[in-house]
Image (cartoon, helix red, strand yellow):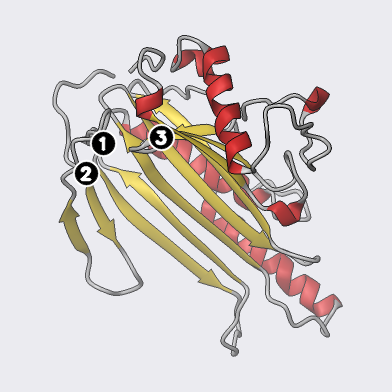
């Protein structure tokens, strides 16, 4: 898992495709928020595939929403490649057998075929499987963009799996996954994030994190390396099981741009 230099700023276009419905386009005029601008042109695409012979209202299915970057966008080829690679990796993570196929349609078919084999072996099972992948552009600026991948799946077991992760990509098409690429002082940033974290969970500065059910290494607060941006600020996302039990769900720490003055490089 863990985008060559262009002059103008592009207006973001969204294209929503749902089955055979006519396509619709709309222009977004971003608000005057710090760092907010529309630098990348893309259309939203949707893929829906269901298991064959599905007669009930709930079917094993794969649903993928993702942006497809237009040729006018900076490094559109690289952006689309990154999105496709992450989508394919997410599908592969839900396959029980290794596969040599490399295209998204083939991987989807392998997932649906896996369910068919499972159903043949365990016909009494009535709970359908699913993969849902929602890729969105959560932030764009002159210098970089943030892609958000919100994935959920179920292939049996006690509960579905949920994972959200970010990709920060420069206008040259390079993934930027280090805090030092965005902030001058990571220690200062960590202190601000820990303050937000403790306030969010009503913890005092002296409260022991392990005693409160949080699972940080060495029992010291650490910033997640899964971070991205929206038009309010920077977001640090801890997925279920990372620093707390599954029941706690995802833990999200948001720091507004107003608290990053002098530290944020952009």
Q: Which mark is residue 146?
A: 3
Residue 3 visible in the current orientation: no
Q: Quadrant of the C terminus?
A: top left
**Of the numbered discs in the image, which one, if any, rests on residue 10?**
none
Nearer to us of marks 1 and 3 is 3
Q: Residue 118 occupies which quadrant of the picture? A: bottom right
Residue plotted at (47% across, 36% down): 82
Mark 1 and mark 3: Cα distance apart in space: 11 Å
Q: Distance of mark 3 from mark 2, alpha carbons?
A: 14 Å
Q: Residues within 10 Å of mark 2 (few under 14, many from 20)?
A: many
Give coordinates of residue 55: x percent, y percent.
59, 90
Q: From the viewer's side, name the closer residue of 200 and 2.
A: 200
Q: Which residue lies under the disc numbered 2?
A: 12
Vertical comparison of 17 with 20: above or below:
above
Residue 113 horizontal/vertical position (percent): 69, 67
Left or right: where 130 falls relative to 16: right
The quadrant in which the N terminus is found is top right
In the rendered image, which quarter is residue 79 located in?
Answer: top left
Compare marks 3 and 2 and give the one earlier in the sequence. Answer: 2
How far from the left and from the top, in percent, is residue 105? 53, 58
In this view, the residue farthest toward the top is: 184
- Check disc 1 and report the residue beneath it: 40
Question: Which residue shows up at 67% across the image and 70% down it?
Answer: 129
Which of marks 3 and 1 precedes in the sequence?
1
Mark 1: few/some/many CA within 10 Å (<14, 14-19, 20+):
many
């Amino acid at each position: 898992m863990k985008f060559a230099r262009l002059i103008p700023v592009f207006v973001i276009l969204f294209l929503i495709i749902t089955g055979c419905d006519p396509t619709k386009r709309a222009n977004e005029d971003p608000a005057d928020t710090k760092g907010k601008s529309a630098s990348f042109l893309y259309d939203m695409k949707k893929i829906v595939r269901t298991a064959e012979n599905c007669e009930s209202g709930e079917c094993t299915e794969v649903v993928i929403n993702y942006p497809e970057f237009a040729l006018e966008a900076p490094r559109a080829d690289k952006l689309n490649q990154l999105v496709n690679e992450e989508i394919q990796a997410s599908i592969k993570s839900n396959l029980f057998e290794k596969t040599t196929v490399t295209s998204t349609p083939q991987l989807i078919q392998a997932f649906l075929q896996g369910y068919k084999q499972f159903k043949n072996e365990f016909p009494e099972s009535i709970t359908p499987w699913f993969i849902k992948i929602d890729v969105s552009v959560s932030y764009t600026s002159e210098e970089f963009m943030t892609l958000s991948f919100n994935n959920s799946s179920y292939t049996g077991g006690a509960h579905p799996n949920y994972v959200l992760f970010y990709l920060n990509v420069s206008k040259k098409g390079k993934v930027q996954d280090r805090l030092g690429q965005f902030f001058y002082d990571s220690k200062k940033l960590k202190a601000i994030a820990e303050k937000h974290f403790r306030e969010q969970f009503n913890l005092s500065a002296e409260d022991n994190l392990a005693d409160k059910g949080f699972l940080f290494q060495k029992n010291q607060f650490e910033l997640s390396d899964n971070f991205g941006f929206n038009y309010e600020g920077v977001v640090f996302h801890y997925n279920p099981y990372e620093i707390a039990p599954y029941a706690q769900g995802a833990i999200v720490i948001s720091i507004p741009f107003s608290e990053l003055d002098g530290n944020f490089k952009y």
